[in-house]
Amino acid sequence: MSESLSPRQQALNVRAFSAVVAKFREALLEGPEALAVARDIVAAFAESGASGGPTRSDVWRLIGERYSPQYGEDFFDARWAVFEHYGAIQPYLAKKHQQRYALHPAVGPAILVHERLRRHRGIDELAALLDETRTLLSRRTRDRAVIEANLSYCRQMISLYAIHLERLVADAGIRELAEEQREHNHPGLSEKVEFLNREVSDHFPNDHALDHQAMALLNAEQRYQRALSAAAQRIVEQGGRSLDFAVLSVEEYLEAARHAPLALLGGFGADLVADTPTVWIDAGTLMKTVGEFAPYTRVRRRPAMPRITPERDPLQRLGEARVRERSRQDHLAERLLVEGDRADLTEELRNSRWPAAARLLADLIGLDADPYAPYRLEIGISLIVDRVGWVTYLHPVYLHRQEADAAQHLRDRGREEHHEAR
């Protein structure tokens, strides 16, 4: 988002950010003037052409000439003293009574961090850390410890965001929740987490600890997205009932004013209370209305007759299905025994995927259990283990045809099918 948050939200972000290194309470400047002074000091030091560094008077003169400060010189002097105390402004030369100074380069990144805190609550840093972790994974030499630490920290940060949003959904007001929900508007965060989880699995396929960290990060991101959805749903439901336009941002309200239909824009006044005009009815109109009034008579009609579709006998359908299934099993056995009365099915089971292998074995066991079927299934006692195949372990399997009973089986099978068809 390009727009800044409200002053209250900015102050809360800065206070929470500075609490990590704060020593005392109430030692922060929460207004925008402190950041403006720091930004002007950085610009003045960078644009000063003084040899050996500018003096304090040179810096204040440059700020007054070029940046039109909204603060006075007393406030500038106070901030200068704080910068000197913390080493942000240092003497150009290590001499006593030195009047020329240099600025520590860490002040610039600090200003950038505070600027981002006025737009997002650290979401940019989280996205940058996800990108950095993906970069580490793409390198030829990967530091596993750093990658695991980054995954753990990203998971912790996303979990904190999710818990914070869940608390606001349960307790915060509609305006505060709408402002918070806009702060978390960072497109592409879910895609970054999904890509990172996939790359961890690709580059560390057998590392279960690292895979667990990546999966935990994905679960935390899904919880964060559920909290965002719950916040948006509450804003829509409660804001729609109260017709509160404060839940819209300036851009959203302006877009609605320009392109929304007139009926939608006028709908916000549907529940407004207003004094309606008095209805004028004379005696003649009243008598005419009473004379023309006819009470409503409800006529009951017979419902339409239900349509009954003829259905086949379910027992007959069951018998036909059994006949078809048994015929399929017989054809399967004959296909396997096409080259002789004995067939080794071990290799066929090993080369099949496990659902197909299980179905084939179940069909053959069913034929073997039928006393009228001329087939016998033999399963060996030795165990074959294949850790890279589709079927990881199995026993040798052989199918036999019993020629003596084959003709009788076909006759019995025909009589059985004829009887079940009747």
Image (cartoon, rainbow, N blue to C red):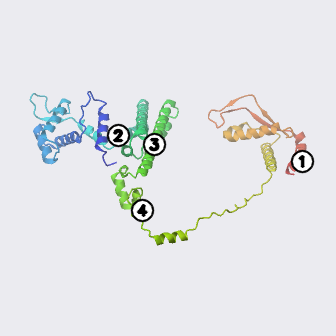
Determine whether 254 is above or below 330 in the image.
below
Residue type at the position of mark 1:
Arg
Q: Are marks 2 and 1 in contact (CB under 8 Å)?
A: no
Residue type at the position of mark 4:
Ala
Quick check: 358 left or right of 319? Answer: left
Q: Secondary structure at mark 3?
A: helix
Instruction: Kindly report the distance in space between the C-alpha atoms of the residues bearing marks 2 and 3.
Output: 16 Å
Image location (x, y in percent) of residue 143: 42, 31
**Which residue has dot 2 on it?**
121
Instruction: Kindly report the distance in space between the C-alpha atoms of the residues bearing marks 2 and 4.
Output: 38 Å
Q: Are marks 2 and 4 in contact (CB under 8 Å)?
A: no
Q: Which mark is residue 415?
A: 1
Comparing labels 1 and 4, the label whose residue is closer to the camera? 4
Comparing labels 3 and 1, the label whose residue is closer to the camera? 3
Image location (x, y in percent) of residue 147: 42, 33
Comparing labels 2 and 1, the label whose residue is closer to the camera? 2
Disc nearer the start of the sequence (2/1): 2
> Closest to the observer: 161 or 258?
258
Residue type at the position of mark 2:
Arg
Comparing labels 3 and 4, the label whose residue is closer to the camera? 4
Instruction: Kindly report the distance in space between the C-alpha atoms of the residues bearing marks 1 and 4.
Output: 77 Å
Disc nearer the start of the sequence (2/3): 2
- Classify mark 1: residues with Cα within 10 Å, few (<14), some (14-19) or many (20+): few
Q: Secondary structure at mark 4?
A: helix
Residue type at the position of mark 3:
Gln
**Which residue has dot 3 on it?**
225
Disc nearer the start of the sequence (1/4): 4
Disc nearer the start of the sequence (3/1): 3
Comparing labels 2 and 4, the label whose residue is closer to the camera? 4
**Which residue has dot 4 on it?**
263
Q: Secondary structure at mark 1?
A: helix
- Classify mark 3: residues with Cα within 10 Å, few (<14), some (14-19) or many (20+): some
